[in-house]
Amino acid sequence: MKLNYVGLQDTAAWEAANIETLKFDWPAMVAQTEETPTWVHFGSGNLFRGFIARLHHDLLQKGLVKEGIVACDTSTGYEIYEKLFVPNDCMTLLAALKADGSIEKSVVASLGMGLRSNPMYTEEFAKLKAVFENPSLQMVSYTITEKGYALLGLDGEVLPKLAEDFKAGPDQCTQVMSVSTAMLWARFQACAAPIAMVSMDNCSHNGEKLRASLVGVAKAWQEAGFVSPEFVTWIEDEKNVAFPWSMIDKITPRSANEVADLLEKDGVEEMQPLLTCKKSVIAPFVNAEIPEYLVIEDSFPNGRPPLEEAGVYMTNRETVNDSERMKVTTCLNPLHTTLAVYGCLLGYSRIAQELKDADLKKLIETIGYQEGMPVVVDPKIIAPKAFIKEVIEQRFPNPFIPDEPQRIATDTSQKVPVRFGETIKSYHNHPELEASSLTFIPLVLAGFLRYLMAIDDEGQPMTCSQDPMLDVLQAQLSGIAFGKPETVGDQLLPLLTNANLFGIDLVEAGLSDKVQGMFKELIAGPHAVRSTLQRYLAQV
Ligand SMILES: NC(=O)c1ccc[n+]([C@@H]2O[C@H](COP(=O)([O-])OP(=O)(O)OC[C@H]3O[C@@H](n4cnc5c(N)ncnc54)[C@H](O)[C@@H]3O)[C@@H](O)[C@H]2O)c1
Ligand SMILES: O=P(O)(O)OC[C@@H](O)[C@@H](O)[C@H](O)[C@H](O)CO
């Protein structure tokens, strides 16, 4: 059984393997996507193919929509396009992993077109432009990781690749923020029909972040004479270009070899994950947990697919914001990053295993229930207490989810200000709470600095996950010697006062001495991470 349209014709074989197949006319969907495209997505990674595309697939299966999604590969080597989209007709096999070890398998076939969003692929770039010029287009969504939105570096300077795009203009730009702006420029000139641009990444106020970046590119191009002032006015008006906010949640780990083996055992051919030129893992299948939440601000000036029919909460901005704050700043992601930092240091390679470690379980419980909950935001549509309980007791410990602390540790510098900084700020600004009363959040911040030393708790070299700030941050720690806390001196101060890194100046929050002290304890020598954790947890 091959995962593509021809392979799916052998329906009996797929049904025998208990894999749900298509109830809609796939070639008709592909043709309709070309004629009246409604949805473009940038960043065709796991979350998109395993969750967002599956929601749309559900709508196709129910006959509620006719068009598929136009999916753009934005990866560095465009291997998702070449190695997955082309051989698999843009289809994905979804392996939903239940806590009892069983797997629900289904084909996700809702991508009506796959493209590489780079002008070096002339034909595909022209196709993307034609899609944006079509008034039928209703929405553009993104899962490109937080760093995909950045125009500026931590130093406040325009990032080099964006600076190149600012000079190159709409026809020759390569970065997603610039390509999106170039496409909106094409739409403005062709029909100026309204559109919704929807970030579905885990960043606070994601709609605002996306808006700021696209408007930023538009203004830079206006100054350089590439686009008109009317275009900037158009893009800035929410009636024309809306930027709904969203909150998305579904643990979608890197595709694991053991899941590929199970799928191949069921008869599906060529399922093994591949290593890309950038050393990331891609696969024709996506493995994910069953629980999922998607909350979107209902602001779509050109209409939208009936997403609520696929289980999406369509609501107002305030509820989205509150749901996102609940999840990303308190009930899930800070706990994940805690397990990432300490899991890497303590030699773990699976999140579920970490939940069996009494110290780590107590650490996340204390951060979540004791330090996070007093300032948690209640979105009303999802109860925070029930949500965090499900996270700690059912989702993280699911032994069949092959999630790794190393995946979650990716780009930690970009996540810390949101995942921890927001809670510190809430304490700092609270009339009755003091940020300086926090203990375990500072212990994670100190743990992150300890992690950056790239030495595990056995004192052995450890590889840190990719992070755009890794080199800069490690350079700021150079000269600090493992096993010699006396080498720390005042060296951490520039980091501790960097509000871009921690979300708030830790000196101002009254936490810098605490974090520095904890860091010294954590670097004292082999096993100091474990003993420091136990020392603080004993006080709970
Ligand atoms: N995986 C999850 O459990 C999960 C759950 C909720 C939300 N999210 C959000 O979705 C994002 C993506 O997660 P994923 O599991 O799909 O990851 P992934 O690594 O499978 O996919 C990320 C995609 O983003 C692209 N990308 C990365 N940096 C980029 C850049 N600078 N410019 C353009 N494209 C870039 C990559 O090429 C890749 O295709 C996360 O960063 C997070 O914000 C993920
Ligand atoms: O996807 P990232 O890299 O922003 O964060 C890693 C994980 O914490 C994240 O992917 C969670 O699995 C997800 O937020 C659960 O919904």
Image (cartoon, rainbow, N blue to C red):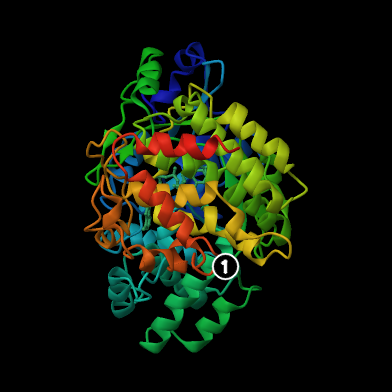
The outermost residue toward the front is 486
Reply above or below: 220 against 447.
Answer: below
Residue at 38% in and 14% down: 267
Point out the image quarter for the N terminus: top left
- Amino acid type at mark 1: Glu
Q: Quadrant of the C terminus?
A: top right
**Residue that sits furthest to the right in the current view:** 380
Specify the quadrant of the image occupied by residue 395.
top right
Nearer to us in this view, 125 or 413: 413
Q: Residue 529: where, in percent of width, then height?
A: 38, 38
What is the number of callouts on the image? 1
Which residue bears the numbered disc 1?
A: 208
Q: Nearer the viewer, residue 136 or 17?
A: 17
The quarter of the picture where residue 294 lies is: top right
- In this orientation, does residue 268 appear? no
Element assignment for label 1:
helix
